[in-house]
Image: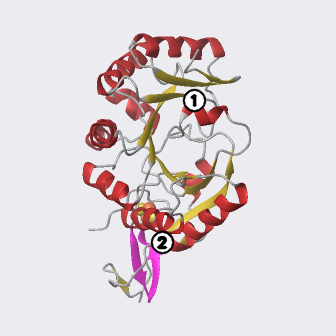
Amino acid sequence: MLFTPCETGGCWSCAVEVNNEVKPACTTSVGDGLVIKTRLADSYIPRRIVSGFSGHPVGGVGTPWWLKRERGYIETACFAAGCNFRCPQCQNWDITYMGKGRALAPAEAAELMTAARREYRVDRMAISGGESTLNRRWLVKYVKELNRLNPDPEARIHVDTNGSILTEDYIDELVEAGMTDVGPDLKGFNLDTFVRITRVEDQRLAERYRDTAWNAVKYLVDKYKERVFTGVGIPYNKKLVSLQEIGLMGEKLSEIDPELQVCVLDYRPEFKRMDLVKPSYAQMLEVYNILREKGLRTVTCQTEYGHIGPEL
Ligand code: FES
């Protein structure tokens, strides 16, 4: 059975051989006379569509907050196409859902990222998306290769993810490969909120994705607190999540670790949700205060005027 998490031709998890050429099954039309092999040769090197490879002045949720205060570029980032979520307010929808671009082998992507690191003179190298974790073989090889090309102790390899398929053994494999920083983006605590934000309509699947992401945060803290920097993202827009639920998420995250970095993203009008209104500074300040009251000590909130916290 093929694993087809994105179904938009981006992640290449579903790669098959069609007339001796490897293609994503989900976007390749079936025709008469095609010879299709669903089992690829052992020598097949995984591929996926990744683009970007340039300097980033802001960073992601897994970027340590103190770096966000610096001017200029703080990391280089690339963006993997394909996602298992269908967030109607996706801020990167053109890269995520269009499946456009060249599918790269892990070594090619690692070389481009290493060159970008040199060009922008930074130490952090982030992969975001789309959902970076969908093609596991690809990501693990990419992180390993990046680690090999950047052996200096200053190099940081940062994975941004929705955490939905980030199981404990997958985390172990990524850490072993060389991942140093990770930013799991939690899309809600209540299932109805999670579904509203991600539009994963299959309730059982949505529940599994949500639980895997929350468990990933706990596992990262319990097992890798000293070795891997974890920064968690949570969403806020009053049309998508209530302040009561923000409090609940704060409580649960504080139980996992009150020191955990938590970054609240102000969800704004994007893509298919142009009806959303960008949260005001006052609303984000309220969110910040709620999370601090729940015991979290390292909270940042994205606002129209830059970040609030954490030393406010
Ligand atoms: S499931 Fe086919 S490319 Fe992602």
Measured Cα–Cα span from mark 1 to mark 2: 31 Å
On-image quarter of the C terminus? top right
Query: Element at badge 2?
Result: loop
- Residue 101 percent across, percent down from the top left: 62, 67
Instruction: State the residue at coordinates (65%, 39%).
Output: 58
**Stretch of the chain drawn in magenta:** 14-25
Q: Within 10 angstroms of label 2, few (less than 14), some, or many (20 or more) residues?
A: many
Magenta stretch secondary structure, dominant? strand
Instruction: State yes or no: Cβ of the residue under disc 2 lies below 8 Å from any atom of ligand 1.
Output: no
- Residue 286 percent across, percent down from the top left: 54, 11
Residue occupied by mark 2: 47
Instruction: Name the quarter showing ligand 1.
Output: bottom left
Query: Element at badge 1?
Result: loop
Identity, as a three-letter code, of the amino acid under mark 1: Tyr
Residue occupied by mark 1: 267
Based on the displayed image, in which of its 4 quarters is residue 36 positioned? Answer: bottom left
Answer with left or right where residue 33 lies relative to residue 263. left
Q: Nearer the viewer, mark 1 or mark 2?
A: 2
Identity, as a three-letter code, of the amino acid under mark 2: Arg
Q: Is residue 122 magenta?
A: no
